[in-house]
Image (tube, grey):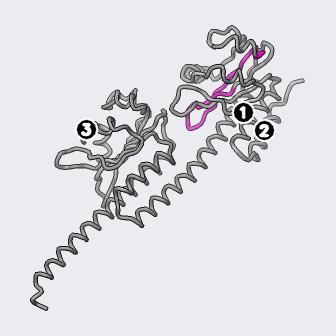
Amino acid sequence: MAKDYFDIFCEVSHALATAATQNSLLNLIVEKVVETMDGKAACLFLREKGSEFFIVQAQTGLSEDYLHASPIKAAELVEALEKKGSLLFEDATLDPRLENHEAKKAEGIASILTVPVRFDNATRGILSLYTATRRTFNEKEIAFLSALADQAGAAIQTNLLLNRVRKNSMLFLELASNINSSLDVKKILDNLTENICDTLDMKGVDIRLLDEDTEEMRLVASHGLSDAFLEMKRTIHTETTSRALKGETVIVADTEKNDRLLFKKEMKKEGIKSMIVTPILARDQVIGVMRFYSADYTGFPSDVLVMIEALAHQGGLAIQNASMYLQLKEEKASLEEDIWSHRAWF
């Protein structure tokens, strides 16, 4: 009897809308895949941040021994999926595109159908159906599995967005509180770089201010980066810095493929794969730049870009407040000295 995939998909969509957590959503998807498509097992993998491997996020029907036999390499699989949309391994125990044939045979796996899981405008994971007997799949079956993978991607995207909004709000509130309660700008900026790394899941952040006399970018705060990387001389003449000093936020989605970047070898050694460079303003003048380094290839979601520019603005505000305080302090001291010099008046 032919299955009505539309009804099943509607059922899954309703269940997804009422599920409590991301884990329950993903577990529901793999269970429905096996139930609906008469599979032996199903597994959803996500690419580990900063890694070349897929890590299991939800599964049903696979043994622990099989799951830990060998991690799945992401790069080649993602490239193939983006070209074809799906991959069928009709005989998973012999197919040369796969590894660990003996483990698959011992697990009782005959065929594997794999589709991409996409969010943040990129393939970030895979959803695989495993069968106990050799099978091929028609277009409707492949479309159904792909639709469930899209549901998984949407659920993950929503969860990531909600988490980012919550974390971003707390980070911004903490920064605003620090600026209002302290004039120790060094402490504020040090805390800012550390909190950004933790909240936005960055590998590292640094803040450099412009020294107009030497045309150098002076380091004033950083977190997550090695001393060797930070000690490299930075000037205003690099492309990203010069653009940022003109008021532009610069995004480098892949540091290895950008031929105009300096320090590419050093970035690779540091584990940096993408970055954002944004200007720091004080009194409507660009006084420096803030760099955000990621250990993952990413185009950076729009809400993250807005948050990054807002944080750079707040950093500039902290510097401006401290500068005004020091200026007033000096003027007050000068005024007191001048008045005291005319004490004979009193």
Q: Residues within 10 Å of mark 1 (few under 14, many from 20)?
A: many
- Look at the image and say whether residue 263 sits in the magenta stretch: no
Residue 118 higher or lower than 334, as above or below = above
Marking on residue 12: 2
Going from N to C along the chain, the mark reached first, 2 or 3, is 2
* Quarter of image, res 316: bottom left
Q: Residues within 10 Å of mark 3 (few under 14, many from 20)?
A: few
Element at badge 2? Answer: helix
- Earlier sequence position, callout 2 versus callout 1: 2
Quarter placement of the C terminus: bottom left
- Residue identified by numbered label 3: 233
Q: Quadrant of residue 5?
A: top right
At x 75%, y 13%, the residue is: 106
Q: CA gap, disc 2 to disc 3?
A: 55 Å
**Dot 2 amino acid type:** Val
Local SS, label 3: loop
Q: CA distance from mark 3 to mark 1?
A: 50 Å
Q: Which residues are magenta?
A: 107-127
